Amino acid sequence: MECKKDKNLKGCNCTYEPCSKKGVCCDCLRYHLAMKELPACCFPPEVERTYDRSFKAFARAWKL
């Protein structure tokens, strides 16, 4: 499968600048799930900027 990093970067809302996984969604998702987190793209901008990527933060953000 071909990586579409350049296309993915256009929609990536991650504000963590030193991230080496930006645009490589499969690596990003694998990393965050292993940490029991979700990636930035699952959060609205104001929550993403807090870097709290926990499932609890996700539930609060979307009022689940």
Image (spheres, helix red, strand yellow):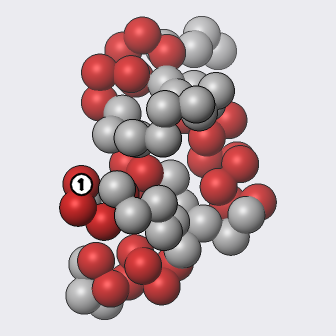
Residue 11 falls in image quadrant: top left
Q: Give the total number of marks visible in the rendering.
A: 1
Front residue of 36/20: it is: 20
Q: Position of residue 50 (x, y in %)?
A: 39, 64
Crowd around label 1: few <14 · some 14–19 · many ≥20 (10 Å): few
Kindly tell me whether residue 26 is visible in this rendering: no
Residue 49 falls in image quadrant: bottom left
Residue 43 falls in image quadrant: bottom left
Q: Could you tell me which residue is drawn at 76 percent across and 60 percent down?
A: 34
Name above or below for residue 13 compared with residue 63: above
Query: Secondary structure under badge 1?
Result: helix
Q: Quadrant of the N terminus?
A: top right
Q: Position of residue 29 (x, y in %)?
A: 61, 47
Q: Which residue carries the number 1 mark? A: 45
Q: Could you tell me which residue is drawn at 50 percent across and 66 percent down?
A: 53
Name above or below for residue 59 compared with residue 28: below
Q: Indicate the amino acid at tag 1.
A: Pro
Q: Is residue 50 left or right of residue 26?
A: left
Name above or below for residue 35 compared with residue 8: below
Q: Could you tell me which residue is drawn at 42 percent across and 79 percent down?
A: 57
Kindly tell me whether residue 53 is visible in this rendering: yes
Q: Quadrant of the C terminus?
A: bottom left
Q: Residue furthest right?
A: 34
Q: Position of residue 2 (x, y in %)?
A: 60, 10
Q: Is residue 46 left or right of residue 43?
A: left
Q: Could you tell me which residue is drawn at 32 percent across and 85 percent down?
A: 60
Q: Is residue 42 left or right of residue 35?
A: left
Q: Position of residue 63 (x, y in %)?
A: 25, 87
